[in-house]
Amino acid sequence: MKSKTKMEAEQAAIAQRSDWLGILSRSVGSELEALAADLVTDSTFEWLRPSDIGLVMVRGRAGGTGNVFNLGEMTVARASVRLEDGTVGHGYVQGRDKRQAELAAIVDALLQQPHRHELITAKVIEPLRERAEARRLAKSRKAAATKVEFFTMVRGEDPA
Amino acid sequence: MAYVAVKGGEQAILNTLRLISETRRGDPAFAELTLAQISEQFGLAVDRVMTEGSVYDRELAALALKQAQGDVIEAIFLLRAYRTTLPRFAVSEPVDTSRMTIRRRISATFKDIPGGQVLGPTYDCTHRLLDFALAAEGLQRPQAGLAAEPLDKDVPQVIDLLGSEGLIEEESDEGQGEIFDLTREPMSLPAGRDQRLQNLARGDEGFLLGLAYSTVRGYGGAHPFVGELRLGEVTVEIVPEELGFPIAVAEIAVTECQMINQFRGTAAKPPRFTRGYGLTFGHNERKAMAMSLVDRAMRARELGEDVRYPAQDEEFVLAHTDNVEASGMVSHFKLPHYVDFQAELALVRQLRAEHMAAREAQTKEVAE
């Protein structure tokens, strides 16, 4: 049986990898290319699974909270790599950009190497996260500008 | 009668393909449309093609629209056909619309709602007068305003305000087993809500709009209120087999409509409102609203109501929503039916001859 602290550490590592994989998945292809191209050129790896394009069936819930149903599919591209030291990386990205999936897979593998993790997080993951957040904020502030402020019309006698 | 193949016309077909290409391009004096232009400036057409084509991919939907010269149903057909060439990598976790990044969110049932009424991008507040300024090129268009603060991150569902008092039926996961998938199995009756909602999500907007209209015009007894209509981005999570843990693989735009409908009570249960649900890819309000009305109408059997009108009849609705199937059936009548028609022609000629002979014989009898 694993000790509690070891399990917690494993959980935290999974949550961390899930987070960076998500950032890579939802990135803008050209932004990932600009941030990660050098890293990738300097790495030696082999394709475990060459990039390909496929579908994910997106599901919803009746009423938002009820029984599950199939809404429709979306395109995704994916790829898997193995670095020289055996580290395996997977990339899944929204859309059909195979190059983006390949970059994501390589960056995922590099991020699992303890000695490079922090540097690559700072160089690739955090800038991608910041840009996504900036776009989300801009959209949300534009929506917030269309928020309706109601005021009550006082009719008839002076209420005082 | 057996099907008889028709041969010939090869050159004519090759030439019609060239002609349609030239017709699609239009006058070469004008610049050719790019996919980015279609996806950016015909965004609502792209959203409809993605929803009914049942593939979320703006670029593919834009390509389909370009290839179909803007014929939305033809574009939907093209996208559905392309879809069959791709493998399925995964099935997502159900999207959580309560955690949507809101771009628009309104309620017709309560004025003051937590998170506020957010108009977002809508034509509802325009005068529907043709704007001739848009006909001019190179003008600076009005820019969106920016509020100092963004909207709240998690905006609660309006419908939950009623739920806490038990005034409206709750939607909870009953842990159903296999989830019906129309892309893998044919329609089957009686249909569960999962099959019905998938069918409606893929269904033709015009057909559903007409059906929804019928339910409020006396063919369904609906008296609906929009509890909430929201547009925004939700994350799509998958658990890839090789990883074994979830990743938020995508962010997609969806429109959701929570329709509150007529209340009913029984001896055992006090009266409460019932619900209909609409969910689409992209910005598709009319479709999401129509979907929620037809969803509610088709729940008649489950709610113990009489099934009396077309929109309540799931066999009728589910079999006729799909515009790829419908246009396939209607369009096929223009294909050669030469042999079928010759057979019918011969039969009608024979019947007429018999009819004439019988009448002549009768006239002769009367005369004698």
Image: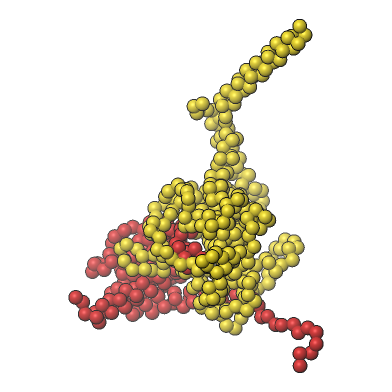
| Residue B133 falls in image quadrant | bottom right
Give x and y (percent) for residue B184.
42, 50
> Can residue B102 be seen here?
no
Q: Give B112 or A101, whichever is nearer the viewer.
A: B112
To which quarter of the image does residue B221 belong? Answer: bottom right
| Farthest left residue in view | A1
Q: Is residue A106 left or right of residue B236?
A: left
Q: Nearer the viewer, residue B360 or B350?
A: B360
Which percent across, then down, holds residue B227? 59, 69
Q: Residue at x 65, y 67 (%)?
A: B122
Residue B9 shown left or right of residue A125 in the figure:
right
Q: What x and y, as percent, mark residue A99?
A: 40, 62
In this view, A140 is above or below B72 = below
* Residue B275 sits above or below residue A111 on the image: above
The residue lying furthest to the top in this view is: B368
Along the viewing direction, whichever of B172 and A70 lies nearer the viewer: B172
Number of marks drawn:
0
Q: Is residue B307 visible?
A: yes
**Colouring used for the render:** by chain
Q: Residue at x 55, y 31 (%)?
A: B11
The residue positioned 63% from the left and 79% from the top of the image is B112
Q: Quadrant of the C terminus of chain B?
A: top right
* Residue that protrudes farthest toward the front in the picture: B267
Say which residue appears at 57% left-offset and 23% top-offset. B343
Q: Position of residue A21 (x, y in %)?
A: 37, 70
Q: Quadrant of residue B282?
A: bottom right
Residue B339, placed above or below residue A128: above
Q: Which chain is red?
A: A
Spot the yellow chain and give its letter.
B
